[in-house]
Image (spheres, rainbow, N blue to C red):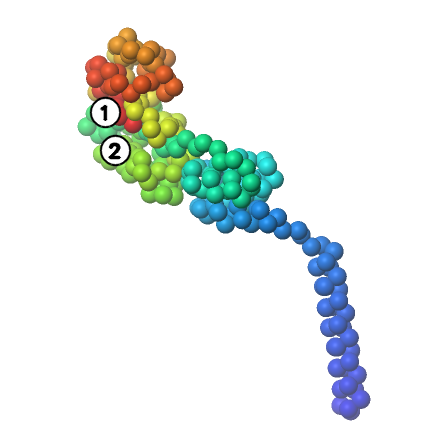
Amino acid sequence: MSGISVLTAAAVVGIVGIFIGLFLGAAGIIFKVEVNEKEEEVLNALPGNNCGGCGYPGCSGLATAIANGEAPVNACPVGGEAVGAKIAEIMGVEAQETVRKVAFVHCQGDCDKTHLDYDYSGIEDCRMLSFVPNGGPKSCNYGCLGYGTCAKVCPFDAISIVNGVAVVDKDKCKACGKCTAVCPKNLISLVPYSAPYMVACSSKDKGPVTMKACSVGCIGCGICAKNCPSEAIKVEEFRAVIDGEKCTGCGTCMEKCPKKAIVEA
């Protein structure tokens, strides 16, 4: 190959390279995406768990919503009040009061307190038991199945299965809501961390039926409601319900409950 051919080839490559560089540079300017600095700051302030408990697709989705004014500064349940205050400072708004919440299992029917209709042998996933007779082997069709699907999805290791029933560690729970979403019995709810007492039963069966299935199930007798000095309890669908706003935490309901279905939260 002659020297002229080599120089020609080099020139062509150089010209093509320059053209591509100019094209990419122009494209970068034309299609440049403006970065919202506040969005970046908010994202850095978030804990980065990407649990989805805020209702947005991960922390980046929430950061975008907050920066655009579409979500409150305290929308992150994991970060709580501290993160909310930091983001409020970034956004230049007043910090909003945050009520810390935790997951609560409305059931205490463990293996010693509930009756079984049959022995189950199969996939240990609570969601699969909707396909078996009566929705599971326990006589109570509303109680915890105890196969730990909630514990498996908890990103904070806040749930454990103790003797056939799910138990939440209040101090580890970040109220992300994954357990509430996955429980096929819908017996896990997010309640205020400071709630003094809760009804640890989800049964909607009449008293006699509940008593046959579980020794600690609420029978809807109404004794708690009759003795509550602040009228914070009522019976709905054969089960006691506590109004957290009226409850003063006196403990009378727990003391009077004949089945011990009301417990300290």
**Which one is in front, 158 or 113?**
158
Q: What residue type is labelled 1?
A: Thr
Give the SS element for disc 2: loop
Please identify the quarter of the rendering in which residue 258 is found.
top left
Q: Which amino acid does label 2 sit on?
A: Gly
Q: In this view, does 234 lie to the left or right of 163?
A: right
Q: Position of residue 256 (x, y in %)?
A: 22, 14
Total numbered circles: 2
Give the SS element for disc 1: loop
Q: Position of residue 90 (x, y in %)?
A: 53, 44
Q: Name the residue under label 2.
A: 164
Q: Marks 1 and 2: CB-CB under 8 Å? A: yes
**Which one is in front, 131 or 221?**
221
Q: In this view, does 237 lie to the left or right of 68?
A: left
Q: Residue 197 carries which label?
A: none
Is residue 55 depicted above or below 30 in this figure?
A: above
The answer to which of marks 1 and 2 sits earlier in the sequence is 1
Q: Mark 1 points at which residue?
A: 114
